[in-house]
């Protein structure tokens, strides 16, 4: 019985140490994802996943290469 109690205490201490070393980020602490709008179709996408094109010195973000090509074609 004493061994079982000691084992339980050791497990609890190890869990506390692990949490101190590897803290989890709560959802409130996570960085928000920046969203950008595709000017061709109005779809919002994460900036990190967007296709970036510089057109006439201005940066645009697209949901796909096809959407970028359609936008460029419409521009003339």
Image: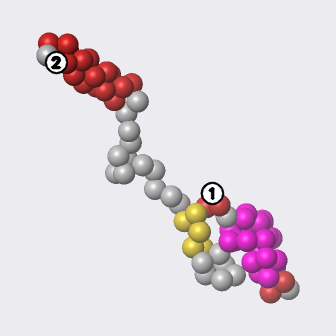
Q: How many numbered marks have been drawn onto this rendered protein structure?
A: 2
Residue under numbered circle 1: 48
Left or right, residue 56 beside residue 5: right
Q: Nearer the viewer, residue 21 or 37?
A: 21
Q: Using the image, determine if residue 58 lies above or below residue 70.
A: above
Q: Using the image, determine if residue 32 lies above or below residue 69.
A: above
Q: Dividing the picture into quarters, in which one does residue 18 lie? A: top left
Mark 1 burial class by Cα count in 10 Å: few <14, some 14-19, many 20+ = few
Task: Using the rendered image of the protein, determine whether residue 27 is visible from the camera's viewpoint.
Answer: yes
Q: Using the image, determine if residue 55 lies above or below residue 22.
A: below
- Start-end of magenta stretch: 51-72
Q: Please name the residue shown 24% across and 24% down the image.
A: 12
In primary-sequence order, the first of circles 1 and 2 is 2
Secondary structure at numbered mark 1: helix
Left or right, residue 15 beside residue 56: left
Left or right, residue 55 beside residue 60: right
Q: Please name the residue shown 68% across and 71% down the image.
A: 63
Residue under numbered circle 2: 5
- The extreme front residue here reads 1
Expressed as whole percent of the image width and height from the top left, the position of residue 53 reads 77, 66
Mark 2 burial class by Cα count in 10 Å: few <14, some 14-19, many 20+ = few
What colour scheme does the image use?
secondary structure
Left or right, residue 30 beside residue 56: left
Expressed as whole percent of the image width and height from the top left, the position of residue 37 reads 60, 73
Expressed as whole percent of the image width and height from the top left, the position of residue 24 reads 38, 39
Label 1, label 2: how many angstroms apart (C-alpha)? 50 Å
- 59 part of magenta stretch: yes
């Amino acid at each position: 019985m004493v061994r079982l109690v000691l084992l339980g205490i050791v497990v609890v201490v190890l869990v506390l140490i692990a949490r101190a070393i590897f803290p989890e980020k709560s959802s409130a602490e996570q960085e928000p994802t920046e969203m950008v709008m595709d000017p061709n179709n109005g779809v919002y996408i994460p900036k990190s996943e967007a296709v970036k094109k510089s057109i006439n010195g201005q940066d645009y973000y697209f949901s796909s290469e096809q959407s970028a090509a359609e936008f460029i074609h419409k521009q003339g």
